[in-house]
Amino acid sequence: MYIDKTDLEKHIQEDLLLGLDFTGSDEIIVTACAQAVGQLKSHLSARYAIAEELAKTGAAREELLLMIAKDLAIYHIWTYNDATSIPASRKERYTAAIDYLRAANMGSVAVNIDPATVTFSPVGYGSNLKRVNHY
């Protein structure tokens, strides 16, 4: 997995993180991390080789995408508890992360990963079959 509990512990206090995961089995943390990775995929897969980036672990990961994934995951963890009690700073970081992903998808900001390879041509070409008409 691209991010996990140990990554989140560097971004939020451990006791707060454990308090937000009321299951006691890290189920909410794992689900929120998977949702964050899903958001990265959905926003960046058209323009970037995001699958290759998400396969990386440790220090090989792109720091900016890792920070965005952490912000998304922590926001999702808060929503499992009480969406009305999310701190304003977490809402701002989530909104900024989504805005960045949208801008990256549109190409107005660059992400430091390889571009996606196009395996199909969006432009079709060719002609109709030639007809033979005899009267």
Image: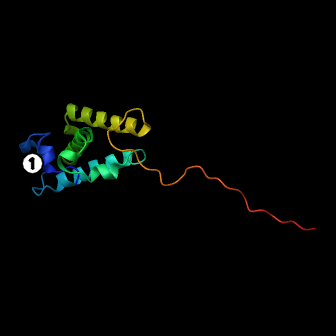
Q: Amino acid at mark 1?
A: Leu
Query: Relative to 23, is 93 above or below?
Result: above
Snapshot colouring: rainbow
Q: Residue 104, how many percent across, how many down?
A: 38, 37
Look at 64% across and 53% down and name the residue there: 125
Nearest to the observer: residue 116 or residue 104? 116
Give the labeled residue for mark 1: 18
Quadrant of the image containing the C terminus? bottom right
Neighbourhood count class around disc 1 (C-alpha, 10 Å): few under 14, some 14–19, many 20 upward: some
Look at 41% across and 32% down and name the residue there: 108
Is residue 20 shown left or right of residue 49? left
Q: Residue 85, how many percent across, how many down?
A: 19, 38
Nearest to the observer: residue 86 or residue 95? 95
Say what secondary structure mark 1 lies in: helix
Nearest to the observer: residue 128 or residue 72? 128
Query: Relative to 88, is 12 above or below?
Result: below
Look at 90% across and 68% down and name the residue there: 134
Is residue 101 shown left or right of residue 59? right
Please state the total of marks drawn on the protein image: 1
Q: Residue 39, how many percent across, how many down?
A: 32, 47
For this orientation, the residue located farthest to the bottom is 134
| Location of residue 63 by image quarter | top left
Look at 21% across and 46% down and name the residue there: 60
For this orientation, the residue located farthest to the right is 135
Nearest to the observer: residue 86 or residue 16? 16
Q: Residue 97, how many percent across, how many down?
A: 29, 37
